[in-house]
Amino acid sequence: MFDRVVVVGATGAVGRLIRTLLEERNFPIQEVLFLASARSAGSTLPFRGREHTVEELRPKVFRRGDLVISSTPDPVAREYIPQAVKRGAVVVDESGAWRMEPHVKLVVPEVNPHAVRDHQGIIASPNCSTTQMVVAIKPLHDAAQITRVVVSTYQATSGAGVAGIRDLEQGTRAAVEGRPYQYEAFAHPIAFNLIPQIGSEKHEGYTSEEMKMVWETQKILEDDSIRVCPTCVRVPVANCHSESILVETRRPLSVEEARRLLAEFPGIELCDDLAAGHYPLPCQCSGRDEVFVGRVRRDLSSPNGLAFWCVSDNLRKGAATNAVQIAELLLENA
């Protein structure tokens, strides 16, 4: 049992969801502390029936016995998290700052829960696009060993924060009304458009978002031999990331076996009836914690290939829910 739960970035979009989930899931808390930037310090946030004053994020606030759930930009995480650990806190970090550090565990509770046992003070939560994909492919990997993944993502504007959602709403309104709009979060219009770049150029023409999917998948599944070819696209959808996934396995998996494995796996909801028009849609998956899978079918170009469609709420399972689930795992293993 931890003495105190500290939510860093408590006033942000993910921080707000973390607070909601801690209440929804009845997380055992003796004391709670909400931290944010100096700009938000002094404001109040509701939690379990009373208002709590937000304090400024400073190293001296952390102490031994703290369970910290942090959602901040990478530079902030790199500055403050080591200081929290130095003072005896355990940190679940949502940022990308620590994910690929060799000494930091990268965890999706449905996929590699054992990893939390050997943590060294920091447990990282993966990128949202990686999180839903590794949940979806894990039962197939366990059954037939995945050798290759080809994935195209259709990522919602909420992945770019509040400004991303604002760009979608106000940019669309401006486009319909035929007037100009100055985009904040995106370098190109998102209204009635697709942007085939998320993140900066990183490696051989792949972006930073795409390379996260490569490296994080291999680390979580503990298999550097898995080849991943990603293409990440921003789409004019407010919330929920969608992914078209093709996997190749060492032994063939029938569609029937794959559906059974997916349906039985914790955290996955199978929605797969093409004739009835029943498959995951972002508008129906928002606000849910599951990873939704449908359109499961044989890869016509490979005898060991399967293709399917995957949708998940990127703010919940892709971020806040996964972090709170990691915190629950830490309690179980305390």
Image (cartoon, grey):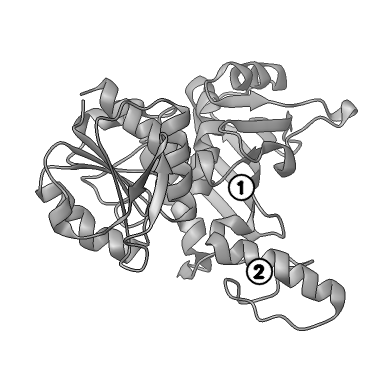
In the rendered image, which quarter contains the C terminus? top left
Q: Give coordinates of residue 257: x percent, y percent.
A: 65, 16
Tell me which residue sits at (17%, 42%) in the image: 89
**Nearer to the camera, 96 or 94:** 94
Q: Give coordinates of residue 12: x percent, y percent.
A: 45, 56
Which dot marks residue 162?
none
Q: Which amino acid does label 2 sit on?
A: Asp
The quarter of the displayed image where residue 285 is located: top right
Q: How crowded is mark 1: few (under 14 residues within 10 Å), some or many (20 or more)?
A: many
Question: Relative to residue 331, is residue 24 drawn left or right?
Answer: right
**Nearer to the camera, 226 or 18:** 18
**Nearer to the camera, 49 or 218:** 49
Element at badge 1? strand
Is 102 situated above or below 79? above
Which residue does the numbered mark 1 point to in the structure image?
151
Which dot marks residue 167?
2
Of labels 1 and 2, earlier in sequence is 1
Q: Give coordinates of residue 189: x percent, y percent.
A: 70, 74
Q: How crowded is mark 2: few (under 14 residues within 10 Å), some or many (20 or more)?
A: many
